[in-house]
Amino acid sequence: MQSDLRVMTAGAGSLSAERNKVLRNTYLLLALTMVPTVIGAVVGIQLAPLFFKHPIVASLVMLGAMIGFQMGIARNRNSGLGVALLLGFTFFMGAFLGPVLSVALSLKNGPQLIGLAAVGTGGVMLAMSTIATTVKKDFSFMGKFLMVGMITLLVIGLANMFFQLPALALVLSALTIVVFSLFLLMDVSRIVNGGETNYIMAATGVYVSLWAIFSNLLNLLLAFAGNRE
């Protein structure tokens, strides 16, 4: 009996250590992705006029690239190529921050708003991680609901490129922040509860959520607090 208990305790300890390792490696890889993201953002700012000239084409290219990169990362999740593809993906996503960053930098308080969006994104990350690690509940049940929500927002967002309704764009940004905050909670909880054991895939999911939260939070800040004087 005591021997069985020792085996069970050792097994639980090993499982906990493995989960902590995945979580640690995920955060380390996320930190590394900030380098190509910043480089991509610098490039994207230079290309911003091109994005503004062809917004629909740029959005479709972005969507196609996101799908392509994520498929490639998934197929190579257990190799160094997966890490390389993730870094390439984050460079690409950084470039697509160029338009909103260029608008922010044209404002008097733009740099402060960028910093505020970054702090807000970090706050959401901290809050979702705290909930996931404290509650230790598996939030995977939200997956289908969130996927439907994301697709709905994407379709409405693409449609609004033709209608150009500012109020709808703001509502979409707010809803996107909510949806991807919940995606973030789900992804971290899957790591904590052993549902995700591959740190490359975990980092990819968390990165996409952080990117969406930051870009849409910055959009809202620009709309409500941007100072052009």
Image: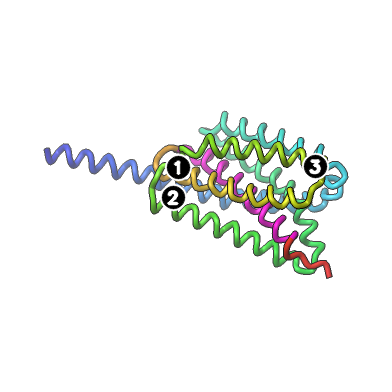
Q: Quadrant of residue 67?
A: top right
The residue beneath circle 1 is 139
User: Which is more foreground, mark 3 or mark 2?
Assistant: 3
Residue 24, x across and y down, in percent: 46, 49
Q: Which mark is residue 24?
A: none
Seen in the picture, residue 168 relative to 151 is either above or below; the reply is below
Residue 64, x across and y down, in percent: 71, 33
> Which stretch is magenta?
196-223
Q: Nearer the viewer, residue 135 or 122?
A: 135
- Dot 2 alpha-carbon crowd within 10 angstroms: few under 14, some 14 to 19, many 20 or more: many
Q: What is the spatial separation of the Cα atoms under label 3 and label 1, in whole angstroms?
A: 33 Å
Instruction: Determine the secondary structure under disc 2.
Output: helix
Give the main secondary structure of the magenta stretch: helix
- Ranked by sequence position, the earlier of labels 2 and 1 is 2
Instruction: Determine the secondary structure under disc 1.
Output: loop
Q: Nearer the viewer, residue 200 or 209?
A: 209
Q: Residue 174 lies in magenta, yes or no?
A: no
The residue beneath circle 2 is 132
Which residue extends farthest left? 1
Tell me the kind of residue under disc 1.
Phe
Instruction: Name the residue: 57% across, 29% down.
Output: 75
Q: What is the spatial separation of the Cα atoms under label 3 and label 2, in whole angstroms?
A: 36 Å
The residue beneath circle 3 is 161
Q: What is the spatial separation of the Cα atoms under label 2 and label 1, in whole angstroms?
A: 8 Å
Instruction: Name the residue: 43% across, 37% down.
Output: 195
